[in-house]
Amino acid sequence: MRRLLTITLILMGCGDTGQEPISRPVFVQGTAPTTFTSGAWTVTLTQAQIAFGPVYFCATTAASSDLCPSAVGEIANAVVVDALDPLPQHAGTFEGFENTAQSAMFDFGTTWFSHERNPTSHTTLTNNAHFVGFAEQGATRIDFIADLRIQPKQQGLHVVQGASLSTRFDDRLRDITIRFVPQRWWENVDFEAFRTSTENPVHITHETPQASNAVTIGITANARPTFIFNQGE
Amino acid sequence: MTIKYLAITGAAMIFLSCGSNNIGTVQVFVEPEGTITHGLQAGDGDEDIKDGWNVTYTKFITVIGNFRAWRSSQPGSVLRDPTIYVVDLQQTPAGGLILATFNDVDAERWDKFGYDIPNASATAIRAQGTSLEDFNRMIDGGYSLHVAGIMTKGLETIQFDWMLKAGTSFDDCAPADGDAGFAVPSGGTVAIKPTIHGDHWFFTNVTHGEEITERRAQWIADADLDHNATTTLDELGQAQASNLFPAQFYSLPENTLTGLGYLNHQARTLGDFDGEGECPTRKEIP
């Protein structure tokens, strides 16, 4: 909210810009549980919770903390998303101005703004993502629990900066839906590494680097949440 | 004479005084960042490599040109020199290499400046200091960048020699401090410096604007899959991102499946402006 207040003040300082304020509901939507493959393993997720937000939309193609004074809107709050629930879940409000957005930057429930001394969590999730599931290959079954920390790496950064998008915020916008496909986050995990593990279930944390890296890269780079800007009545 | 008439006359005089009588010259230099000529050192400083590697470049050749500038207030009036050069950035003169000069330019702020680092074609020109052999290699392969070097960490050594096709346009260039573009002084010359950076593949994220990042090189050593002390592009293409980039350090760009993917992303960010200034609008070009 502090950032949007700043934007508002800048716009007010420039007089009447003709930019109308826009406020619209935001929904998050997961993907129903399905079996998928990761290497030679068949994987099923039974729980997939992820913290998400805040989000800042920028007029420029290159979003960053210093370039986004030209931000045109925000979803200021953070929520915990049930990423296996295919039904839209209300997740807050988009507040912005009539304008075109070309990129977004966002976090997964933990921010590290310039005014925050340390990374700050804004949800009840202990870490930023929590998964439960199992992987099968023939008669072999590996149960796993994953708790992953997904936080800005440095003060002033967001986890995702410069995410490409193109949309116009105006009175035709009805709502924003953010889609999550957790199965894709697990596609590159090497379950073979856990075949001989004596732990049951296997705990996937930053101490199991390949698996935690693969899922984190899936979430933050290769299968990011997607923004759907719904129009109409 | 009404106040309105005075205002219009005054405006016309200001307009005239900013017109053809007030002109200057723009010189475009290309300048290598110090990392290209002096390498990077291991250490805890902001610009140092955090994970203990030292880097020395033995070759750093880029393709650059198509310099352009315009004013937001007069978008139809464009300065443009479409010439493309192949430049050995380790052989440029101290102070930079002049690649374009625009004379009789309106002495105003030109707030839009951009240039390309394209994939080389037969129309490119060999810049001063660039060997014929290197020039031909870039043209024949259609490359935008040839970078080779040595990384050392204690007794460990890793060599690399990469030729990339990472053609990119860079626009909306702005100095680190101050307004975008450049101002032309009346009767004088402004020197503007597209600056090629040599450390972005060591960044732990793709920066936009201010370079808030760390520098790490271990991922290149980890991608030496056959352990022969040389990391090739083939190896980078085989090395999974999850095995190279620890999540506690890296924020990867979209669609980064391998080390080569990350290298290509970062190779499209090397074009900067006036030292540490940025050209934040980047687009892939064929």
Image (spheres, rainbow, N blue to C red):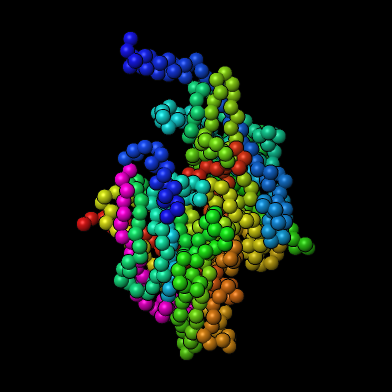
Q: Quadrant of residue B233?
A: bottom right
Q: Is residue A223 above or below residue B214?
A: below
State the residue at coordinates (64%, 38%): B31
Residue sitting at the far right: B155
Q: Is residue B201 above or below residue A143?
A: above
Residue A57 percent across, percent down from the top left: 41, 52
State the residue at coordinates (39%, 70%): A81
State the residue at coordinates (72%, 53%): B41
Q: Is residue B279 above or below residue A29?
A: above
* Residue placed most toward the observer, B226 or B106: B106
State the residue at coordinates (55%, 84%): A195
Residue A206 percent across, percent down from the top left: 58, 73
Residue sitting at the far bottom: A139
The C terminus of chain A: image quadrant: bottom left
* Residue placed most toward the observer, A63 or B136: A63
Part of the protein shown in magenta: A19-47
Q: Is residue B82 visible?
A: no
Queried whether the magenta region covers residue A34, the answer comes back as yes
Residue sitting at the far left: A233
Q: How many marks?
A: 0
Residue A178 percent across, percent down from the top left: 36, 63
Queried whether the magenta region covers residue B197, the answer comes back as no
Q: Is residue A53 visible?
A: yes
- Left or right of residue A230: residue B58: right
Q: Quadrant of residue A182?
A: bottom left
* Residue placed most toward the observer, B36 or A127: A127
* Majority secondary structure in the magenta region: strand
The N terminus of chain A: image quadrant: bottom left
Residue B11 percent across, percent down from the top left: 40, 18
